[in-house]
Amino acid sequence: MMLRARSLPCSLVLLLACASDPGGDGGSSDASSGADTGPASTSADGSGSGDATAATTTGAGVTSDATATSGSSGGTVGDSSDGSSDGSSGDTGAVACAAVLCEDFEQGALDETVWTRIETDDGNTVTVQSDVVAGGSYAVQFHAVGGTNLAMMFTEAVPEPLRQHAFGRVMFRATDFPFENGGHSAYVLGGNGLDGFPWADHHLEVGSYYDGPGPIWQLTYWTGDGPEYIGAGGHIPQDEWFCLEWEFNDEPNQIRVWVDGSEADGAAFDDIQGQSDLLGEIASLGLGFRTWHPMGAPDIDVYMDDLVLDTQRVGCPG
């Protein structure tokens, strides 16, 4: 996997045709704030989360069914004249990424200089594989054995342009969801670092909550050392690929989600606690599977493909 940055202090950009700006703003505004208004209440020390213990690895424990190659894949980082995140072609005809970060996993393995921290419980894996993909030949798989908490990968050097306000897009598929006590789980974490992970870190979160007929979005500001603040809504498709977009904003604090480009199945948590700068900065980004309520959960596989991060809404591929 080869990553290159455009005038950034950290080398984060894979070669991918980034999708065009959808031309829409915002999401639904039916989410509420306050620890007593969300669908679930969990404590920052992980109570109710089961007795599984996270096993931390750095680089180790990552598997792949293909060998990563070194060197460029032939693309370059380009600029789009209208400031959107769509891909463009350079003089050589290679597809470029005009966003801040693009990751399509097509090198067949994770770049451990970028995804610097892997967190898994015993028996869980983070794998670049070719059996279940949204596009191309490879996607990343996060496998969690039933009753366990954790299978995630992290970058600990989020590029400077994304540290206060960031948009993301990934093709997403989850085979199942925890349901015990609502099954509060997370798939995207934007934090001010990983100190105290997994129970006492400080982050904004795109997650799920099992509500009656199925999973809905749970958008959380997790304080790490106190209450959590929750917004919820929408609908999460199960065991099928869909385009997941999100927005993390620390000034003012806000989380939004779109599903297949639409607000209808998404959710919004605006003006969290009426404050700004709750995190200070978005210094780390985590992707994968993390649950606070694993008891009774089946084996779960979360797949992600075609990741793009930018300073504006990215939109869906195609």
Image: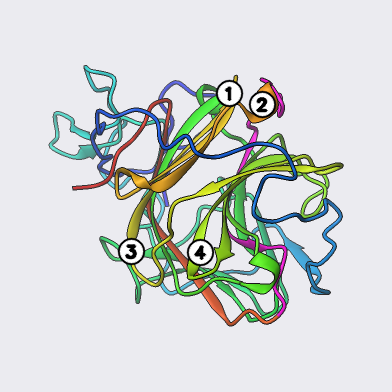
Whether 245 is drawn above or below 182: the answer is: above
Task: Name the residue rendered at 56%, 64% in the picture.
Answer: 211
Q: How dense is the environment of label 3, judged by Cα within 10 Å: few (below 14), some, or many (20 and up)?
A: some
Cα separation between marks 2 and 4: 29 Å
Name which of mark 2 and mark 1 comes first in the sequence. Answer: 1
Sequence-wise, the earlier of marks 4 and 1 is 1
Above or below for 57 versus 74 = below
- Residue placed at 67% from the left, 22% from the top? 274
Identify the element where label 2 is drawn.
Answer: loop
Say whether marks 4 and 1 touch (CB < 8 Å).
Answer: no
Q: Nearer the viewer, mark 3 or mark 2?
A: 3
- The amino acid on which the numbered mark 2 sits, given as a three-letter code, is Glu
User: Which residue is under mark 4?
Assistant: 215
- The answer to whether the residues at label 2 and label 1 have Cβ atoms under 8 Å apart is yes
Q: Which amino acid type is marked by label 1?
A: Gln
Q: Nearer the viewer, residue 38 or 15?
A: 38
Nearest the eye: 130 or 111: 130
Which residues are the magenta region?
275-295
Along the polypeptide, which appears first: circle 3 or circle 2?
3
Residue shown at the point (65%, 61%) measured from the top left: 184
On the image, the x and y values in percent for residue 243 come to 33, 52
Across and down, in percent, residue 197 comes to: 78, 51
Q: Which residue is mark 3?
A: 241
